[in-house]
Image (spheres, helix red, strand yellow):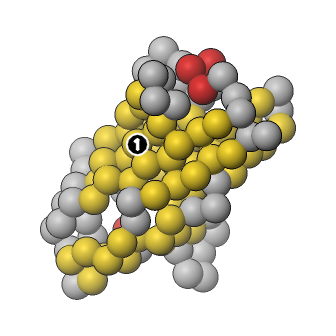
């Protein structure tokens, strides 16, 4: 059974840092590209960052330079380090992967940034 379990969300102030994690079971974690998405109230879910098997990374423009995606294959865990947080970063953050074209999502973790 494939499970993606996010943790680490919370309420922070603008300018603060936060790290969210996603523990993955049921797949060969090291063989999969992993992605962070977020969904803010009233907005469509958007891709935030992804990291390939080889460690190549991509960031959406609004978080580039502030967020860092990383993975620990020994722990089957994906991370998103978020620095200089802004109120517009408030959203539910989801980790995502697909295996053979089949999508898998975590349940999400809420990040709220107050001004």
Q: Position of residue 85 (x, y in %)?
A: 25, 65
- The answer to whether residue 38 is above or below residue 66 is below
Rendered residue at 30%/48% (across/down): 81
Q: Quadrant of the C terminus?
A: bottom left
Whether residue 94 is visible, yes or no, is: yes
Image-based side of 73 in relation to 8, left or right: right
Whether residue 60 is visible, yes or no, is: no
Rendered residue at 83%/38% (across/down): 102
Image-based side of 93 in relation to 25, left or right: left
- The answer to whether residue 64 is above or below residue 12 is above
Q: Position of residue 52 (x, y in %)?
A: 53, 24
- The answer to whether residue 33 is above or below residue 35 is above
Choose between 49 and 22: the one closer to the eye.
22
Residue highlighted by disc 1: 79
Q: Quadrant of the N terminus?
A: top right
Q: Position of residue 19 (x, y in %)?
A: 32, 53
């Amino acid at each position: 059974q494939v499970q993606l379990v996010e943790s680490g969300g919370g309420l922070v102030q603008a300018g603060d840092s936060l790290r969210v994690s996603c523990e993955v079971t049921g797949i060969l974690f090291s063989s999969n590209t992993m992605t962070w998405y977020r969904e803010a109230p009233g907005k469509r879910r958007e891709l935030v960052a992804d990291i390939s098997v080889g460690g190549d990374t991509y960031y959406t423009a609004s978080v580039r330079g502030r967020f860092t995606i990383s993975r620990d294959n020994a722990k089957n865990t994906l991370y998103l380090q978020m620095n200089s947080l802004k109120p517009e970063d408030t959203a539910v953050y989801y980790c995502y992967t697909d295996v053979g074209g089949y999508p898998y999502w975590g349940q999400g973790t809420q990040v709220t940034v107050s001004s």
